Amino acid sequence: MPLSQTFVDPVRIPENTDWVISILLGCIFLYIFMMNVIERQANLKDFLFQKYFDSSNNLPNWIITSVVFVLVLSVLISQYVPVLPRFITENQVFGFHLNKFGYTLAVISLFYFIRTSLGFLLYHSIGDGKKWNIFYFTSTKMQFVISILLMMLCVAHYYFPIEKNKAFEIYVVAFSFVFIFKVLFYMFHKNNILPQKWYYKFLYICTLQIAPLLMLWKLLFF
């Protein structure tokens, strides 16, 4: 008599993505607050093309766009983190430990804070402290545009049937182009936001743009 086999179809538990919507809605609210309160109901064109000497409240705008940028970038790439480091999984606070999103958010936030602090110290140590304000004013506009694109990518990634592995390859290529464009944008911007001397420009690009990204990649994906 042949042996009977019982095949059980695997049950696929749908992923709960309510947290993604909550974060995106929070980011949208921050931008609405920035445009309507801090920028006094400025439209998008006026905000993106305003000149430094005609602008106000640059620091709050920079902080808000930085927070939104870090949040949406963490949402997008956190699911690609292969494993959490052992020191994260073995150490708990009140019985909880960081998940992939929490770990990614912590790493990117630390990376952003350290890079910003070193940039601030570099500009002031070489006597270009006045350029620092123009630098983060200019970078705010770019971060704003990129963060909007990242929000759209988050929606497509979590709520549309796309192939995640192929999408990751596209993300890597796209982020590489964005990085190259950003460096060129900083180098040739009319506001002349990088340090004046060429070796300081080289120092900034290598130590505060390229090297931190390599370290960030290692912390997240290796």
Image (spheres, grey):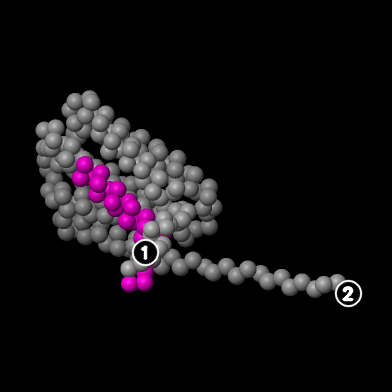
For residue 133, which quarter of the picture? top left
> Which amino acid type corresponds to the residue marked 2 in the rendered image?
Met
Task: Give x and y (percent) for residue 143.
Answer: 28, 46
Is residue 105 on the magenta stretch? yes
Closer to the eye: label 2 or 1:
1
Task: Give x and y (percent) for residue 149.
Answer: 37, 49
> Which amino acid type corresponds to the residue marked 1 in the rendered image?
Asn
Q: Which residue is the site of mark 2?
A: 1
Whether residue 154 is visible: no
| Magenta span | 94-118
Residue at image coords 53%, 47%: 166
Q: Is residue 190 above or below residue 11?
A: above
Q: Which residue is the site of mark 1?
A: 91
Horizontal relation, residue 69 to residue 162: left or right? left
Task: Give x and y (percent) for residue 163.
Answer: 54, 52
Whether residue 89 is visible: yes
Residue sticking out furthest to the top: 198
Mark 1 closeness class: few <14, some 14–19, many ≥20 residues within 10 Å? few
Horizontal relation, residue 123 to residue 21: left or right? left
